[in-house]
């Protein structure tokens, strides 16, 4: 009798670990796909947030001109869109995102992808000029778009779980 109870508990625990483990892996590996289809508040950019936040987990295609950096912070460098250097988007563990436009301006965004500051690398000062945030976000999309386009549809679509888990982050 004890063996049957132990075996049933073991099987249920094993199935639970496999199910939730696969679910967590699925949500991480397909986060960019899910972010493209999730409801969000205006101004919040789930795709840009997820592409660098889960850079270690998502598919990183080998595309000429694009480099990935996983040491410490997560960065995507794109040499095609930078003016003097490669443009890059990075995720910092303080829940901040940094965009280097490759033209001596460094934009800092908060955890909801709202612009915090603009740092001019040449003058070593924060710029006080008004910034067209939508134009900056379009530039960021151009930098990461090849990576976003390379993401495939998941085998088992867990969009409803992704939406439920990230509802507070994107709204």
Image: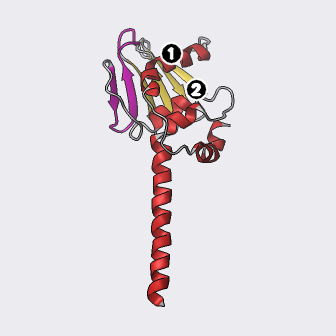
Look at the image and give the residue range highlighted in magenta. Answer: 66-85
Q: Is residue 110 at least partly visible in the picture? A: no
Number of the label disc, if any, that sits on residue 139: 1
Q: Residues within 10 Å of mark 2 (few under 14, many from 20)?
A: few
Residue 70 picture quarter = top left
Look at the image and tell me whether residue 90 can be seen.
yes
Residue 51 marker: none
Q: Is residue 73 above or below residue 143?
A: below
Image position of 133 with respect to 168: above or below: above
Which element is circle 2 on? strand
The residue mark sitting in front, 1 or 2, is 1
Tell me what residue is drawn at x 60 percent, y 17 percent. Answer: 133
> Which residue is painted at 51% across and 39% down in the image?
31
Residue located at (50% from left, 30% from top): 97
Measuring from the top left, give residue 15's x and y in whole percent: 48, 65
> Would you name the residue on which mark 2 appears?
116
Q: Residue furthest top?
A: 83
In the image, residue 71 lies in the stretch drawn in magenta: yes
Q: Left or right of 134: which side holds 143?
A: left
Quarter of the image with the C terminus in it: top right
The answer to which of marks 1 and 2 sits earlier in the sequence is 2
Horizontal and vertical percent position of residue 126? 52, 18
Q: Give the total of numbered labels.
A: 2
Instruction: Please state the horizontal and vertical placement of residue 131, each as a whole percent of the image.
Output: 60, 13
């Amino acid at each position: 009798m004890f063996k049957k109870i132990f075996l049933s508990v073991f099987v249920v625990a094993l199935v639970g670990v496999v199910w939730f483990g696969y679910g967590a892996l699925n949500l991480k590996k397909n986060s960019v796909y899910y972010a493209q289809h999730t409801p969000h508040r205006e101004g919040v950019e789930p795709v840009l947030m997820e592409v660098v936040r889960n850079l270690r987990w998502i598919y990183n295609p080998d595309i000429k001109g694009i480099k990935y950096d996983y040491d410490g912070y997560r960065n995507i460098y794109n040499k095609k869109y930078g003016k003097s250097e490669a443009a890059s988007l990075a995720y910092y563990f303080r829940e901040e995102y940094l965009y280097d436009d490759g033209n001596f301006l460094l934009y800092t965004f908060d955890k909801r992808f709202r612009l915090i500051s603009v740092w001019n690398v040449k003058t070593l000062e924060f710029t006080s000029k008004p910034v067209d945030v939508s134009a900056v976000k379009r530039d960021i999309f151009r930098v990461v778009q090849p990576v976003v386009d390379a993401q495939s549809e998941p085998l088992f679509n867990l969009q409803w779980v992704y939406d439920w888990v990230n509802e507070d982050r994107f709204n």
